[in-house]
Image: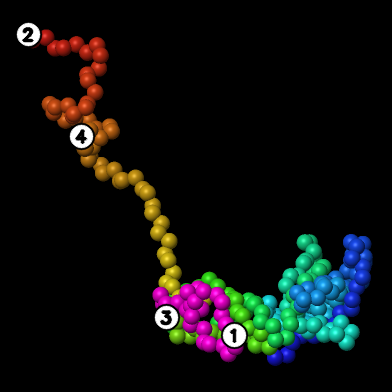
Amino acid sequence: MNHPVINAVLRTGTTKGELNTLRREGKIPAVIYGGGLPASHIVLDAKEFKQATAGISESTIIKIAIGKDKKDAFIRERQREVLSGDIIHVDFLEVVKGRILRAKVGIHLIGSPIGVKDGGILETPAHEVEVECVPADLPEMIELDISGLQVNHSVHVRDIPAIKNVKILTSSELVLAAVKYAKAEAVVAVEAAPVIAGAVPTAGAPGAVPAPGAAPAAGAAPAAAGAKKEEKK
């Protein structure tokens, strides 16, 4: 596997003013740590760094050349200026040859699922897994063929083909891809019941008028106060 190579020089300046001066000159302050030795403070060329790291994954090992000394490392963090988005600092995690490491490796899905052709929608809830191996065996990415994936079926971590000398630490039950039918959103329209001309409201219903001679409905309001009873002749 060919690893990107980035040239760097050691730096001694650590004050805010010195770091800002480097950035104005097209440089990026950086630090390398994790190799069992004190951290190395270095300076990178911003243009070279951008070109060398374009499109690489988080699990890609980069060779950093500091004079005659070369270190293998991951990019642990890139700090960016809020407004411009320019990289203003990089943290590298050094890896030591032969020493077992843990890293996250991206999943690259291959093929068009059968279920999608049948009208399903592909969902990819997870995009990486954590692995354990020595640096020489670390894959840049893991390819997974999902062309046979049908509707209402899913692919899990356990379905990843075995990789020589690489142990997957992520739970085997984690779903990496699934095909499901689209869920139609139920729209419930609440409408008033249509009024039919000439229809008599149900007794006891608001606005109902009892038929002539009919007994008052249960719970009906008594006759209006002050009404006179008809005297018998």
Q: Secondary structure at mark 4?
A: loop
For mark 3, what is the residue? 150
Cα–Cα gap, marks 1 and 4: 79 Å
Amino acid at circle 4: Ala
Q: CA distance from mark 4 to mark 2?
A: 33 Å
Give the label, 1 or 4, closer to the camera.
Answer: 1
Depth check, front residue: 119 or 21 = 21
How far, Cα to Cα, is label 2 from label 1? 112 Å
The residue to which callout 4 is attached is 203
Measure the alpha-carbon separation of dots 3 and 1: 29 Å
Mark 3 and mark 1 in contact? Answer it, CB < 8 Å.
Answer: no
- Disc 1 crowd, CA 10 A, few/some/many (<14, 14-19, 20+): some
Residue range highlighted in magenta: 151-175
Disc 3 vs disc 1: which is toward the camera?
Answer: 1
For mark 2, what is the residue? 233
From this viewpoint, is residue 177 visible? no
Give whichever of discs 2 and 3 has the lower sequence position. Answer: 3
Q: Are marks 4 and 2 in contact (CB under 8 Å)?
A: no
Residue found at x 70% / y 91%: 1
